[in-house]
């Protein structure tokens, strides 16, 4: 099955499930492709060959993880999704099964996820402000790991707030789908030591 066919199948599944539960805002459903799918897929431009184990925090309706997993088919990449809302996690499992994606879904909050392993890449979209997001992500990041995080117009203020709590390197990549948005590429994340 082609990537476009898989994405169309995922979109149809999402629309079907969204009728019974709120996976994505109903106001954005008519813009599903540009607002959610293409927005997720732009992260592919930032993937490295070494990005094999990906963790998505607060996966919700499957963005950005499911489009990324579809686009990564046959690369050997594996995806771990954390989604605490049981009904959303059930949707994610159904989508992974129907699309035969290399994906594990955990119905758990990131702070409660018991994992001693680190991931090559952490993603998250529309979950929390940057300080809280970095606090959730940091224990999953190894020395060579990065995070790719979708952020909106307030990203500069969020970076300033996060810099009060953490040291990190950040690259800002303009969003292809949101004129005011960015993809923040975070590396070398560590908590500031208490003074």
Image (tube, rainbow, N blue to C red):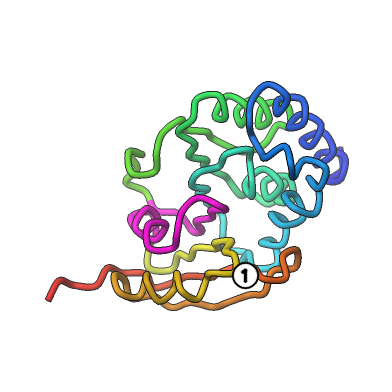
| Position of residue 131 in the picture relative to residue 66 (left or right) | left
Residue that carries the numbered disc 1 in the rendered image:
182
- Front-lying residue, 156 or 16: 156
Residue placed at 37% from the left, 71% from the top? 161
Where residue 66 sits: x, y (%)?
A: 67, 43
Look at the numbered disc 1 and give the secondary structure of its residue.
Answer: strand
Where residue 153 sits: x, y (%)?
A: 59, 69
Residue placed at 74% from the left, 50% from the top? 71
Q: Magenta residues? A: 118-141
Where residue 90 sits: x, y (%)?
A: 57, 24
**Residue 194 higher or lower than 42, as above or below:** below
| Position of residue 83 in the picture relative to residue 49 (left or right) | left
Q: Quadrant of residue 25?
A: top right
- Front-lying residue, 17 or 71: 17
Q: Going by the picture, which residue comes out furthest to the top?
A: 20
Let me know if residue 84 is in the magenta part: no
Quadrant of image for the C terminus: bottom left
| Position of residue 95 in the picture relative to residue 54 (left or right) | right
Total number of numbered labels?
1
**Residue 70 higher or lower than 18, as above or below:** below
């Amino acid at each position: 099955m082609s990537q476009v066919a898989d994405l169309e199948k995922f979109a149809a599944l999402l629309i079907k499930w969204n009728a019974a539960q709120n996976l994505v805002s109903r106001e954005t459903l008519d813009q599903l492709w540009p607002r959610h799918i293409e927005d997720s897929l732009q992260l592919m431009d930032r993937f490295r060959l070494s990005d094999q184990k990906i963790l998505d925090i607060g996966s919700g309706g499957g963005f950005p993880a499911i489009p990324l997993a579809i686009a990564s088919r046959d690369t050997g990449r594996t995806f771990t999704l954390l989604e605490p809302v049981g009904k959303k996690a059930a949707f994610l499992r159904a989508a992974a099964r129907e699309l035969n994606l290399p994906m594990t879904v955990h119905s758990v909050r990131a702070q409660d996820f018991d994992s001693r392993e680190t991931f090559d890449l952490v993603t998250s979209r529309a979950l929390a402000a940057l300080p809280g997001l970095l606090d959730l992500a940091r224990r999953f990041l190894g020395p060579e790991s990065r995070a790719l995080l979708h952020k909106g117009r307030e990203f500069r203020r969020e970076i300033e707030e996060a810099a009060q709590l953490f040291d990190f390197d950040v690259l800002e990549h303009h969003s292809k789908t949101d004129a005011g948005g960015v993809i923040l590429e975070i590396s070398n994340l560590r908590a500031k030591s208490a003074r």
